[in-house]
Amino acid sequence: MNLPAAPFISVIIPNHNGEKTIGRCLAAALASQYPAFEVVVVDDCSADSSANIIARYPCRLIRLPEHGGASRARNTGAQNSTGELLFFIDGDCLLQPHTLAKAAAAYQEKGAGVVIGGTYTLLPYDQTFFSTFQSVYIHYSETKNIGNPDYIATHAMLIEKDLFLKNGGFDEHFMPILEDVEFSHRLKKRGARLLMDESILVQHIFNFTLARSMRNGIRKSKYWSVYSIKNRDLLSDSGTASLEFKFNVLSCFIAILLVLLGILLKSWGVSLPVLLLLGTNLYLNRNLVRAFHRARGPFFAIPAVLYYTFVYPFAVGIGVFSGIFSQHFGLRP
């Protein structure tokens, strides 16, 4: 009995000033235990030494003459690839030894016309508190609806090259992030199927501190709100922008208002609903709490829940307000 040939996969990696991570990214990609693949790196006019680092590895390097953004870099990589399948990752992500093999197996099982997504490993490459918090949160959010995800992220996206090119690739005139969300929504409207496979994993290098975590929350929520307002799905249940996450942010600010109102009126009875609100929020996010615990036990889970519940919502609130403000006044986000 002849087994089907392994489909040839082109791993597409955009790079812009990624000297701190691109070497590890390429070393991991080239160590993949899969028989038929190439690595295509598109340098988006970097000003650091990353292009010289890339040149040391046996991969195809394409240099863009001017900075055009991640979407243009990914599209250029796809157009200059030779694979039947494209596997998109980021320059700060590490393929695991069997990632490509599992992606190819999922494609052969599901058939043509399916866009297959993977996610981050539960623990990141750099296992600091804030990096681990982010990795666990994204892993949980992206795998809780594997049968019908709202989008497939470009940190682990497998798609047929013909399907990608036929649908125009990523929008090069879109916002600087969330191009994968827009592309996924465009594909779904045209009848393509999206599937998540939690066995397809990449390990992310975050290097997050408190400040970087908060800045990331502000930036992502700003563009999410802009896109969601335009797309009229502000209250949709969408991956990392899930309904339970939105309730978490809303409950934090309502709780603060109730406490302040109780202090102002000198009546703690006004603040009693806070307990019910926080209890409801904890119940709705119970599976995320379990994910925090599964990652590194109770001594990580407790501060992670506190950060998620009482600190991170401020970053999201600032981002959402900024996005709404820019939309209202017609400013470029």
Image: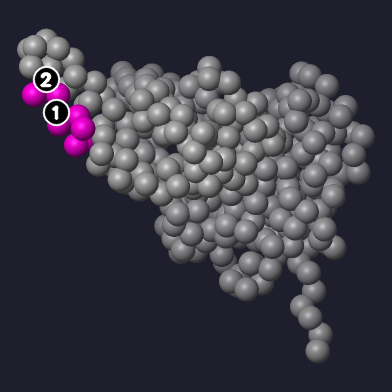
Magenta stretch: includes residue 168: no
Q: Residues within 10 Å of mark 2 (few under 14, many from 20)?
A: some
Q: Secondary structure at mark 2?
A: helix
- Where's residue 240, x and y in %? 45, 42
Q: Which residue is mark 1?
A: 272
Nearer the observer, 66 or 109:
109
Identify residue for label 2: 268
How many badges with numbers are in the image?
2
Magenta region: which residues? 268-277
Screen quadrant of the C terminus? top left
Relative vertical location of residue 18 with respect to residue 105 in this rendering, above or below:
above
**Is residue 222 shown above or below 174?**
above
Q: Position of residue 183 (x, y in %)?
A: 51, 48
Q: Is residue 208 visible?
A: yes
- Which quadrant is home to the N terminus? bottom right
Q: Nearer the viewer, residue 297 or 169?
A: 297
Mostly what secondary structure, the magenta segment? helix
Tell me if I can see residue 169 in this picture: no
Please state if 128 lies on the left or on the right of 150 as rendered: right
Tell me the amino acid under the disc marked 1.
Leu
Q: Residues within 10 Å of mark 1 (few under 14, many from 20)?
A: some
Q: Is residue 173 above or below residue 9?
A: above
- Residue 273 colored magenta? yes
Report how far apart the C-alphas of labels 1 and 2 lie in the structure. Answer: 7 Å
How far across and down, in percent of the image, does residue 235 sit? 29, 42
Q: Would residue 311 appear left or right of 168 to someone viewing this image?
A: left
- What amino acid is at disc 2? Trp
Instruction: Say which residue appears at 22% left-offset and 26% top-offset.
Output: 255
Q: Are marks 1 and 2 in contact (CB under 8 Å)?
A: yes
